[in-house]
Image (cartoon, helix red, strand yellow):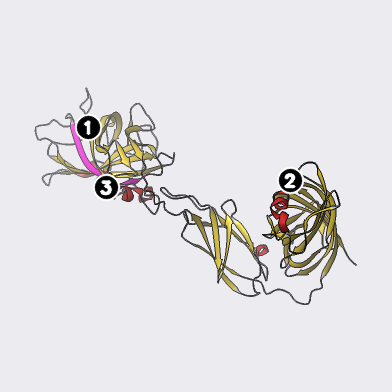
Amino acid sequence: MSYLSQTLRRGAVSCVAVAASIGLSAGAANAASLQAAAKCKYPIVGTASANLSVDAALPTEVEGTIPATPVRVELAFPREGGGVGLPVMTPGYRATGVIRLRVKVTLPDGSSETNTISAQVGEYTVPTNGTLGYATHSIVGTGTLPAIDTTGAGIATIEVVGFGPNLRMTPIDELGDSQWFRTPTTDVDGQPFADSDGLPETTDLPCRFEPAVAGVKLADVAVQLTCLPVILPPGKPGSAPISDADITSTSVHLRWTASPTPRCASPATSYRITYGDKTVEVPATQTDVVINGLSPETAYAFSVVGVGNNQPSESLVVNVTTDAGQTGEPLLGYALAGSTQIKTLTKGTLPLKGAIQVQPISGVAFTADLQLNDTTGRLVTAGFLPVTAKIGFVPSGKTTGLFADDVLKTASKVRIKVKEIKLFGAIPLAGGNSCQTRQLSDINLQSTEAGFTLAGGGSLTGTYKISDLNGCGVLNGVVSPLTAGDGNTIALTLTRRS
């Protein structure tokens, strides 16, 4: 027996269970019914009329789930002038079997499922006072439309898109030969039709609506969603491929797909990655992160969860083993020159100079020691006040990077120190070695379209954010808002040293 696919039960948690706990139930039953004219292809005598009736006590309104519902199906074969009812059924014959309904359920979110209900036919006996082939016959079957867990508020539409009986016809006594009733090999439209079970003692009748239509609606059910204030966590993040280029001896570029938001659940507002005793959290707009500071040739299990309403989702576990690394390879040295453009309330351009020493790890990955010299430049703050600023960039840890297909990508973490700010180049406002950003700035650079070569170098560009300042003295509260902000740009040229 085939039933509507249980895949209609979407989501691990049903809001109906929540609704039931506060006394909610399905709306009043709706005597949903369908009556439609049809044509069926009979053995021996060909195509003739039939009438289909479907009845189901479906609710008019539900809280989340349409409950399992009994379905009554009747297929009547009326006598026609010069034609037949249920053809070639001699008085005294009986029919048992199923009437198969193909039912399409279109959910409020627009998705749909089409599966089969097998309505069991009680034994029907051809009246003994009938005339061969000239009686009106009606067979009745009963089945069940399983519970359907919906995916959102709105209207769920249930329609019948196909039907046809599969019957076993046998005489009451031992006389007669049921082998006469072979399944037709073509349907009403003359298209090839296959026997559903291959049994010679059963007969399939191919049927369709008349006039031919894609489907006939049985019912519309209004779906309401009621969730308690306790919101469920987001869905589990999905896995995403990680290539060899994403793994070095000391880092891994983790990737995942966004957490889904099941019904009654909070969307993910961040992702939390844990490994060992360490935790990294990134915003929900980010579905990847580079983890640095790992040990070579070490297996790590990274747990990724979506966090919403302060609740973690089910964990996605990503297993990674870091590379062994390569020893003895020469360092690659580059001179560094360029500029950074500040785009906060304090605007202007500062020159940059320094150096970078690169240690190859694999064919495409590397770590590097970054050195940025202190820089001094003239800026404009608050839109019109000229200031002179001396800024230091202090790298935190190693710079990591990937080089593939002539494209270089680097990732650095830098603490920005405001060593001196003077109004009109003469009036000190703030500064000192302790005047620095509260948070590290992530500076991610990528080579430009001109390309990059290890032998010669090339140009890199990127953006970064400056966080609030602290340790800047009595005017910290004045200076910090003038410098904090994102969208700052950086452009560098790396030139290989001989």
- The magenta region covers 137-149
Residues 102 and 198: in front is: 102
- According to the image, label 3 marks what residue? 200
Residue 350 showing in the rendered view: yes
Mark number displayed over residue 151: none
Crowdedness of circle 1 by 10 Å Cα count: few (<14), some, many (20+)?
many
Specify whether 495 is left or right of 360: right
Crowdedness of circle 2 by 10 Å Cα count: few (<14), some, many (20+)?
some
Of helix, strand and loop, which one carries label 3? Answer: loop
Task: Tell me which numbered mark, 3 or 2, is placed earlier along the sequence.
Answer: 3
Specify whether 105 is left or right of 1: right
Residue 29 % position (x, y): 24, 37
Q: Which quarter shows the C terminus?
A: bottom right
- According to the image, label 1 marks what residue? 76
Q: Amino acid at mark 3?
A: Pro
Mark number displayed over residue 345: 2
Specify whether 331 is left or right of 75: right
Task: Tell me which numbered mark, 2 or 1, is placed earlier along the sequence.
Answer: 1
Q: How many marks?
A: 3
Of helix, strand and loop, which one carries label 2? Answer: loop
Of tags 2 and 1, the one toward the viewer is: 2
- Compute the Cα span from label 1 to label 3: 24 Å
